[in-house]
Image: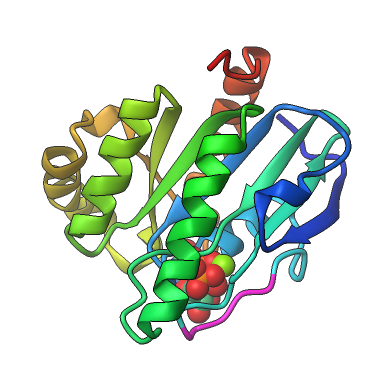
Amino acid sequence: MEIKSAVFLTSMASYLQRPPIHLPQLAVVGKSNVGKSSLINSLCNRKMLCKTSSTPGKTRLINVFLINDQFHLVDLPGYGFAKVNKKEKNRWAEMMEQYFRESTLLCHVLHLVDMRHEPTQDDVVMSGFLREMGIASTVVATKADKISRGARMKHMAPICRALLVQPWDIIPFSCNDGTGRPELLKHLEDVCQFLAPRTS
Ligand code: GTP
Ligand code: MG
């Protein structure tokens, strides 16, 4: 897939303010700081479409982008950010729960994990949740530039064990050196062919 146009549509604190145009959605989830917003920028070949930061907790709202006038790409706030207070954590949990419950147009999720680290308990919960909800997902292992090619397989094993996926189903990705960008775009092309809103 070639991303020819990427337009910021809206930021929502609640999914009840959903976008007026009904298009299939593809969402990006993962731990805070894993590289969700950076991945969207990289895919769209734009530096500042999404705001990124080296400090976790940058994305706090549900941000929706219109891609190729064809589907919505949704940048979600990250989970597992230890430094936020309980009130903020509860707000996050409610916002995400509501999003996943109400977003009947959500067709596919890119679940990002940092290639360098074992998935966290939150990652495992997210993976199980997506499976339970019947939402198709793809695991993307980010920050691949931090691991040499030869060592990557070793880093995939704990990800496979924790998230119950096969190594060949994981897409290694780096927004710094372009690793995995063509593969992920091809994957999105395949996914988009079958984008159809969930029936439940
Ligand atoms: P939240 O919005 O807080 O949930 O974070 P996020 O998942 O959107 O992460 P973001 O894209 O803001 O990136 C977090 C940090 O990781 C930034 O400093 C990025 O420059 C860095 N980063 C993201 N992707 C990569 C990558 O592929 N390689 C390297 N080396 N750094 C990356
Ligand atoms: Mg972000």
Residue closer to the observer: 141 or 183: 141
Is residue 5 found left or right of 61 in the rendered image? right
Number of disc labels: 0
Decide if residue 163 is in sight here: yes
Task: Judge whether 154 appears above or below 139 on screen.
Answer: below
Q: Quadrant of residue 163?
A: top left
Residue at 50% of width from left, 37% of height from top? 109
Task: Judge whether 127 appears above or below 176 on screen.
Answer: above
Residue at 88% of width from left, 33% of height from top? 69
Is residue 7 found left or right of 99 in the rendered image? right
Q: Position of residue 157 (x, y in %)?
A: 12, 44
Per the rendered image, the range of residues in magenta is: 51-55
Q: Is residue 149 magenta?
A: no
Is residue 108 found left or right of 137 in the rendered image? right
Q: Position of residue 172 (x, y in %)?
A: 38, 46
Q: Quadrant of residue 8?
A: bottom right
For the N terminus, the quadrant is: top right
Q: Main secondary structure of the magenta part?
A: loop
Colour mapping: rainbow
Decide if residue 119 is in sight here: no
Task: Judge whether 157 appears above or below 187 on screen.
Answer: below
Q: Position of residue 38 (x, y in %)?
A: 59, 64
Q: Position of residue 22 (x, y in %)?
A: 82, 29
Residue at 67% of width from left, 49% of height from top? 15
Residue at 17% of width from left, 39% of height from top? 160
